[in-house]
Image (cartoon, grey):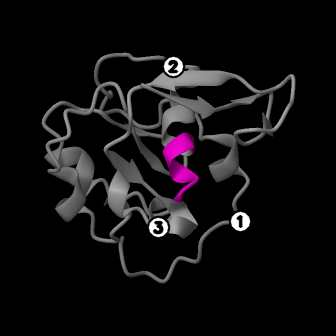
């Protein structure tokens, strides 16, 4: 089990920082992580490949539930923008997305499988604060 710094009321802080707005979230370790290349793309090929529906849709990004994922890896090669990484292979510029994926589930908990009907709960505050990603028309 790993503790992640979380956000509350729109305020986000990282590990080691003090704030009354921080909640510690206990999830088992992430194995697969969806990172920034997914923001504003959300191709959803990974959702189709996931055998247990542990990939949830936010408004701008998809998220892997760390407690529901069975670590099968089917999602990783399905992603056309290479946004899914094995945790140990996550590029350093995306290291914050481990906490982003885990933190997304603070409000919805562990529903036991993603619904196929669209966004579940907005986005993690760090994703919501990102500028809109350029749409180059590569994926429609």
* Quadrant in which residue 125 is drawn: top right
Q: Is residue 58 visible?
A: no
Q: Which residue is mark 2?
A: 108
Question: Which of disc 2 and disc 3 is earlier in sequence?
Answer: 3
Please state the horizontal and vertical placement of residue 100, each as a whole percent of the image: 56, 43
69 vs 20: above or below: below
Q: Earlier in the sequence, mark 1 or mark 3?
A: 3
Q: CA distance from mark 2 to mark 1?
A: 25 Å
Q: Residues within 10 Å of mark 1 (few under 14, many from 20)?
A: few
Look at the numbered disc 3 and give the secondary structure of its residue: helix
138 with respect to 25 (left or right): left
Q: Position of residue 124 (x, y in %)?
A: 62, 40
Mark carried by residue 117: none
> Taking the image as drawn, is residue 50 in sight?
yes
Left or right, 51 with respect to 10, comes to left
What residue is pinned by disc 1? 131
Q: Going by the image, does 108 lie left or right of 13?
A: left
Stretch in magenta: 95-99
Q: Residue at x 59, y 41 (%)?
A: 123
Residue identified by numbered label 3: 37
């Amino acid at each position: 089990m790993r503790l992640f710094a979380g956000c509350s009321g729109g305020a986000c802080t990282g590990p080691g920082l003090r704030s009354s707005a921080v909640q510690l979230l206990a999830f088992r370790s992430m194995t697969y992580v969806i990172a920034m290349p997914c923001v504003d793309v959300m191709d959803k090929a990974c959702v189709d490949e996931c055998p247990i529906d542990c990939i949830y849709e936010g408004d701008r990004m998809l998220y892997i539930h760390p407690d529901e994922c069975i670590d099968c890896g089917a999602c990783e090669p399905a992603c056309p923008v290479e946004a899914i990484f094995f945790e140990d292979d996550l590029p350093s510029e995306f290291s914050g997305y481990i906490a982003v994926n885990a933190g997304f589930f603070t409000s919805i908990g562990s529903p036991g499988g993603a619904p196929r009907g669209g966004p579940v709960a907005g986005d993690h505050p760090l994703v919501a604060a990102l500028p809109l990603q350029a749409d180059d028309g590569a994926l429609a």
